Structure formats: structure tokens, C-alpha cells
Image (tube, rainbow, N blue to C red):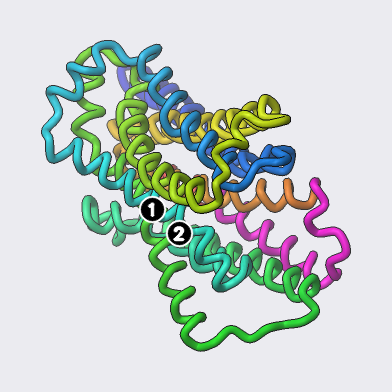
Amino acid sequence: MGCRVRSKDTRTRRIFVNHQLWLGVGVVITAGMLQGVFAVPMKFASRWNYENIWLVYSLTGMVVFPWLLVIATVPHPAEIYASTSTTTLFGIAGFGVCWGIGATLTGVGLTLLGIGLGMAIILGLSASLGSLIPLVILNPQNLHTRQGHVFLLGTTIMLAGIALCARAGMLRDAIRNREVVRASRNRFLTGFIVCCTSGLLSSALNFSYAFGGAAIRHALDLGTGAIWSAGIVTALAVTGGFLANFLYCGYLLLRNRSAHRFFGAGAATNWFCGALMGFFWFGGQTLYGLGISRMGSLGVVVGWPLLMGMIVGWPLLMGMIIVTSNAAGIATGERNGVSAHDKRFLAVGMVMILTALGVLALAQRYS
């Protein structure tokens, strides 16, 4: 009788685990979709330069919304930060600054190498390093388990899909730019270094979560709900990222003398577009934190701590950003007139990314 009761309890717990797991996966996928379309409002911000719309987006998405959410959902945030070591806090903010620099370098790298090759390097490095570095440093033994093997397989498929999508971008650019100008060797080398640096630094936001566990634990100890606990890291990290974006946009505003555009004709619509970009981006980042908390909080049952939720969640997020941004580009006419060959590359790449999402989700089922 006792064995049957325990067996029933075990089945009930497994059903609960599977439900929570797939709920977490679904939340991360939704986060990627939001972040994949966050830049679409830029198309409607007429009469504004890049630095105008990007500064409004950065201010709202990286400062205003994150701290409003912390105030609304985290009790005693000042006490949480006070009880967290200075080393941890500087680590969270420092990784955020690194991520912000990486975001700034993305535009420079794409200018030097082109969208196709540049995105292949940046997203490939960000998707892989953002997951592998925390795993190797904090929990390397999992690389040699069934979990680790399935995770590495999913990451490999993900990177192959990203490469195919990048190839599609290169074909598109070649069609649109009939006159191909060969970059000098020095220009290519500079662009390659910039893109590699951007890809490495862009993955640093995930490190803030991986190495900011102490702050999350203090938040939980002081009464923060589990689903909101990651917000204490998010707000500090992305505020650090805002500093890098603010400095770059400020430089462009001074150089281009474009600050007056904030108050010119059509400014209200453009402010709304910038704020909407911030809402989409931070909404996706918030859902990412909720998703990995849901996926990683099952460690007692299935053996995957929060770290593993982040390791699997990061490539899931990156993959959905790629898929959604390409879909948004198609919907807004960015691929009008491209060849069938280009469309086949894109379709196969997106299928591979979706396949990788399933494999990475499957990795969490192994104990």
C-alpha cells in the first residue's frame, strides 16, 4: 500500500515538473519573440536620427521600466543590495556595462563586415558563449552527463541554423548591392575583431544572472516571490548597460547636433515609438528572467539548478530572436525581391533553430 502511494506521489510530482518545465520554456520563447520585434517601431520614428530613438529606447527599456518593476514586485530592494557583497554587485553591474558596450559595437561591426557575416559572428558567439562559459566555470561536470551531451547537441544545431540565416542575409545583401566593393584587408580584420568583441560582450548579460545568485538568494530570504527574484539582478545589470549606450548616443547627439529633434515636429509619436521599443525589449528580458527561474527552480526534483535554466534558456532566447526578427523583416518588406535560393537558406535555417529549441528543452528532462 505504501509503495503504491509513493508511486502515485512520484507520478504527480513528475506531472508537475513537466508542466512547470514546459511553462518555463514557453515563457522564454515568448521573451525571444518580444525581443525579436523590439526594433520594428524604429521604422515609424520619422525625422529622428538613430541616436534620438536609441537613447529614448535605452532610457525606458534599461532604466525606467526595470526599476518600476523592482519597486512594484521586490520588497526592501535597498536592504537586498545592502546585504549583498560589493563584489557581487560590481560583478552584476560590470557584466551589464560589458553587454551595453557589446550592443554599441554591434552597429559598428555590421557597418564594417555587412549584416550577413557580422550577425553570423555576433549571434553565434553570443548564443554559444552566453551558455557555455557559465557551465564550464560554475558546473563543468555536467558537460560529461547525458544532460550536457544533449545540451551541446542542441547548441550545435542552433549555431548551424544561425549560420544558415546569416548566409541568407549575405545573399540578400549581394542582390541589393549589385556593385560589390571589396573591403581592404585591414578593414576586414578590424571588422572581424569588432564583431568578435561584440559577440563576446553581448553574452555578458547572461553572466550577470549566472554570477549574481547571491543577490537573488537575499531577495528570496527577504520575502521576494520566486518568479520576481531575478528582477533584482536585471535592473542593476541593464542600468549598467544603459551607461554605455548613453555615452555613445550622447557623443552622436553632440557630433550631429541632433538634440533639438527631441522637441521638433512629430516628436510625440517618436517618443512613443522609442518607449514602445523599450517596453518590448524589457518585456522580453523580464519574461526571460521569469522563464529561467521557472525552469531552474526544479533542481530539487530533476537535478537542474537555476544555472542550468540559464544555460538552456539563453540559446532558446537567441534562437527565437533570430526567428522572430526574420519574420518581422519579411512582414515589413525587407526581403521583397530576393531570390528563391535566399528564401530556401532562410527557411532551412529557421527550421534548424526551431529544432534546436526542442533539443535544448529536452535536455532538462534528463536527471
Q: What kind of residue is marked 2?
A: Leu
Q: Do we see residue 25 in this rendering?
A: no
User: Residue 151, percent across and down?
Assistant: 42, 56
**Picture coordinates of residue 38, whole percent (x, y):** 61, 39
Residue at 78% x, 69% y is 342
* Looking at the image, residue 246 lies above or below residue 76: below
Q: Main secondary structure of the magenta part?
A: helix
Depth check: give the residue in front, 205 or 112.
Answer: 112
Q: Measured from the top left, where is residue 176 in percent x and y?
A: 79, 70
Q: Read off the residue under disc 1.
A: 101
Q: Residue 2: which disc?
A: none
Quarter of the figure with residue 210: top left
Write the start and end of the magenta stretch as one range. 332-357
Residue 356 falls within the magenta-colored stretch: yes
Residue plotted at (28% across, 31% down): 300
Amino acid type, label 1:
Ile
Distance from Cα at disc 1 to Cα at disc 2 = 6 Å
Mark yes or no: residue 191 visible: yes
Q: Secondary structure at mark 2?
A: helix
Q: Are marks 1 and 2 in contact (CB under 8 Å)?
A: yes
